[in-house]
Amino acid sequence: MQLGGGCASGTLFTVGGGNARMLVTLLFFICGSLIATHHVDWWFALPSFPAVSIVKSFGVLPALVLSLALFALIAVVTVRLEKRRHGQLEPGVQSEHQGLRRFLRGPWPLVWGAIGLALLNYATLALAGRPWGITSAFALWGAKVASGLGVDVASWAFWQMPGNAKALAAPVWEDITSVMDIGIVLGALLAAGLAGRFAPSLNIPARSLIAAVIGGLMLGYGSRLAYGCNIGAYFSGIASGSLHGWVWLVAAFIGNSVGVRLRPFFFAGERPQVALSGC
């Protein structure tokens, strides 16, 4: 994420917003996802722990209280560390617009965004029968292109799983995740246009371009092994009561800590977009 410039949703909305560099990240995100589908049978054959649901283990209310308590603890620790290092918290993003104009032209207050995410995740669950996800569509797009080029991806173990085989055989517009991903891009395009911020630039420094390639490949490969990115693995994972969402959070924090230290080499003299801002 730190090298690529965002997670799956962040990549999509920055592409829609006119960021040409993120097109490179998206392309290699798709490539990494496709490569991972060729290898997943090896990964999934490794020893593993059984699935753990804190909802099934503790019940709905205790699981909800436990999750909220953990989030509260993270917030308290984060605020204290931020104040200790910088003396105060960074002020929230302000807007010159109010009311409906702010809704249309942004930026939204954080509470609006949080409520919007919760409602849309619920709508996704009701319509698709599963929590919100992003990255499975990238693997599908890559497989469709590879298949069109003559690669027998249908023989791979990943694409022989019933759900994946059905998605590979059907048109892209029948895949719910693909339609939602395209919607994210179009929504970001509309938002950038309304805010007057759509200004694509092809002036991409070489190191930044290399970072996009490396980051995109790692994002694609890792998201298939982790069953998603910030949305599918973390946001929807925790929302559905899966312990794996919390494990992902710890691993992602460690990975981002390493990525932040690599950024100065790839983005020397630049001010790249913070990788988690769109996720």
Image: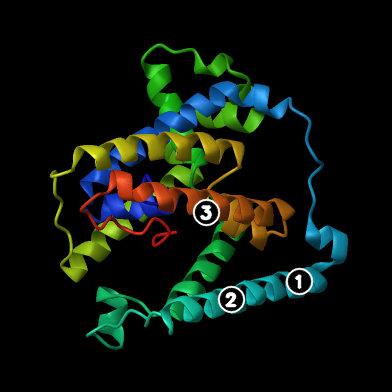
Q: Which residue is mark 1?
A: 66
Amino acid carrying mark 3 in the image: Asn
84, 178: nearer the viewer: 84
> Where does label 2 land, which residue?
75
Q: Residue 175: image x %, image y %? A: 49, 40
Q: Earlier in the sequence, mark 1 or mark 3?
A: 1
Picture quadrant of residue 55: bottom right
Real-space CA distance between mark 1 and mark 3, rounded to the nearest whole angstrom: 20 Å
Label 3 belongs to which residue?
230
Query: For the residues marked 2 and 1, what is the alpha-carbon distance in whole angstroms?
Result: 14 Å
Instruction: Name the residue nearer the viewer: 128 or 186.
Output: 186
Is residue 173 found left or right of 224 in the rendered image? left
Mark 2 and mark 3: Cα distance apart in space:
18 Å
Q: Is residue 37 left or right of residue 95?
A: right
Residue located 17% across and 59% down the image:
198
Front disc: 2 or 3 = 2
Work out whether mark 2 precedes mark 1 in sequence or the reverse, and give the earlier one. Answer: 1
User: Closest to the observer: 63 or 270?
Assistant: 270
Which is in the foreground here, disc 2 or disc 1? Answer: 2
Asked whether disc 2 touches disc 1, contact meaning CB atoms under 8 Å apart, the reply is no
Q: Is residue 227 above or below residue 77?
A: above
On the picture, is 17 further left or further right than 146?
left
